[in-house]
Image (cartoon, rainbow, N blue to C red):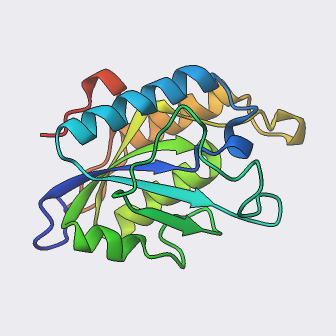
Amino acid sequence: MTTLSDRPNTALVVIDVQNGVVAEAHDRDAVVANIAQLVDRARAADVPVVWVQHSSDGLPKGSESWPYVPELKLDESEPVVHKRYADSFEETDLEDVLARLKVGKLIVAGAQTDECIRSTLHGGIVRGYDATLVADAHTTEDLSQWGAPTPDKVIAHTNLYWENHTAPGRTAGTVTTDAVTFA
């Protein structure tokens, strides 16, 4: 279990499911539907939902591309972490938010698989968190024209290596949306 003391709680961390991030994403509608289901189930179980929202020169705050997709409804009581780097922990208040909520276990979903999802999973595990990736609730766009594998392969590879990831005193792994338990 987590190496963080006095952190018995779990949080659903939803990363960058913003208009401009997922507009061209692989299997967008199914992934967004799975994330919406996770959010509903987390709320029903009184598990915190932590939203992470990216901004950059190409994704400026306040632009039409910047908001979360309309299918996902953020609750005003839920924290929103603003970031400028791939790792959601880097120069953000995410660790403070999780400490306040006594969270030691992260359930991670969102976009982009090959950048912010991977970076945040690794950022969490090296900081002492247990980190579980929801295998059918993350996505990426097609970057194959720049030499990347196709999105389905990027997603499958990320699921494969995170399913088998280990770290001393922490747990990693993958689970499907239907198999996520917030107990």
Numbered circles on residues, count = 0
Tell whether 24 sits left or right of 92. right
- Quarter of the picture holding the C terminus: top left
Task: Please provide percent x and percent y for residue 132.
Answer: 33, 45
Relative vertical location of residue 62 with respect to residue 89 in this rendering, above or below: above
Task: Please provide percent x and percent y for residue 41.
Answer: 26, 32
* Viewer-closest of 41 and 84: 41
Q: Residue at x 54, y 20 (%)?
A: 30
* Residue 60 figure quarter: bottom right
Tell whether 137 sits left or right of 38. right
Task: Please provide percent x and percent y for residue 62.
Answer: 72, 60
Q: Residue at x 41, y 70 (%)?
A: 94
* Residue 25 figure quarter: top right
Tell whether 85 sits left or right of 177. right
* Residue 153 figure quarter: top right
Residue situated furthest front in the rendering? 76
- Quarter of the picture holding the N terminus: bottom left
Task: Please provide percent x and percent y for residue 68.
Answer: 59, 46
Q: Residue at x 36, y 40 (%)?
A: 164
